[in-house]
Amino acid sequence: MIPPRLIYKPGRLKILDQRLLPHKIAYITASSAAETAAAIKDMALRGAPLIGCAAAYGMVLELERQKPEDRRQKLEVRNKELDSAAAAAKKTLETAGITLKSARPTAVALFYAVDRMLSKADLLLDKHPFNYTHFLAALRAEAGLITSEDKTACLRMGSLGAGLLRKNSVVLTHCNAGALATMGIGTALGVITRAHALKKIKHAYSSETRPYLQGARLTIWELVRGGVPSELITDNMAAHIIKTCGVNAVIVGADRIAANGDTANKIGTYGLAVLARYHGIPFYVIAPTPTIDLKLKDGSLIKIEERSSDEVTFINGRRSAPKGVKARHPAFDVTPAGLITALVTEKGIIRPVNRKNIAEQLSK
Ligand code: MRU
């Protein structure tokens, strides 16, 4: 079993510190939106759906921190005061939303969760009289719903994706799109573990995912714990392994998918899609529908996070490149829709991946 990634209790959110994995299972505690945003930014937690769930609870935490005089719970207060309490709650959530949205730019799940919490708040604020206790309970419930929807979506995608794989599959995955990236069984890794349970997986390869090593620290750990026959490879081994080891599918998650299907995922994903096409093997993207950003007409509009170059020039806190060297660290890349064999969401399988088929599935 993979340890719980987030544990919410009123006033605090315990976050499994993924920076310490696989060596140590330890939690940090956030008690505000700012602390939640810092945990997302510093990658104590990571993975698109998990970031979204944490952000939703970050909004709740901020509401819980509101000063008692701003809450005005008593229903006997006059309408004017009730209005000011509602305004204070709205302001608190909007400010929390801005803080959380600034944590990381690429995974749209973060923006989806914050906007959904704000929409829920707006709906409730339209209703009179405002009651802080009821308002808070409803927003806690909304954060819980975002989380449970993620779990359900993972299970559904796991089954649909496993159905695409044949017996004796040899698969390759990149980064970590497992339980550690979600509140459920994971997206790409959920497909692999589900297919393993159906005895369809002969072997799984996890690429180490330089520079942050999500594959080496997290994915292979999940695969081993799940009893999936697997091996770790470095990123630059992928072409050789695909050519010589019978890899017959590449399966990845996604951080943001544009309306035409262009897909942002961990840096290195695009290269794997090109390799898959060259070798004539399917390249599957597994992602829940909140990952699809219909506002963006194509992948050129996806904002790619550029992280600190220290993550490239240092390994385990030790410099690995000469002092003063400049390094690039785009954390994601964009795979053109045309290289994606199928996109699996909780609503079904989209194939071919194009604007029309995506719009059609989302309208269901
Ligand atoms: O930088 P990270 O570790 O947050 O990047 C994670 C990925 O790229 C995952 O593949 C993606 O978020 C999908 S997770 C279900």
Image (cartoon, rainbow, N blue to C red):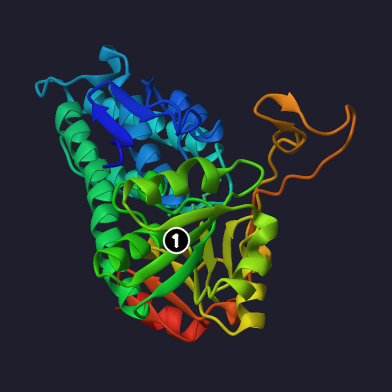
> Foreground: 78 or 359?
359
> Foreground: 364 or 118?
364
Q: Residue 187: x percent and y percent?
A: 38, 59
Q: Residue at x 67, y 81 (%)?
A: 278
Q: Residue at x 36, y 75 (%)?
A: 362
Question: Does the beta carbon of the residue at mark 1 sit less than 8 Å from ligand 1?
Answer: yes
* 175 shown above or below 32: below
Q: Residue at x 52, y 66 (%)?
A: 257
* 281 shown above or below 216: below
- Which residue bears the numbered disc 1? 291
At label 1, which amino acid type do we have? Thr
| Quarter of the figure that contains the C terminus | bottom left
* 109 shown above or below 307: below
Q: Residue at x 46, y 48 (%)?
A: 220
Q: Residue 60: x percent and y percent?
A: 30, 31
> Foreground: 119 or 85?
119
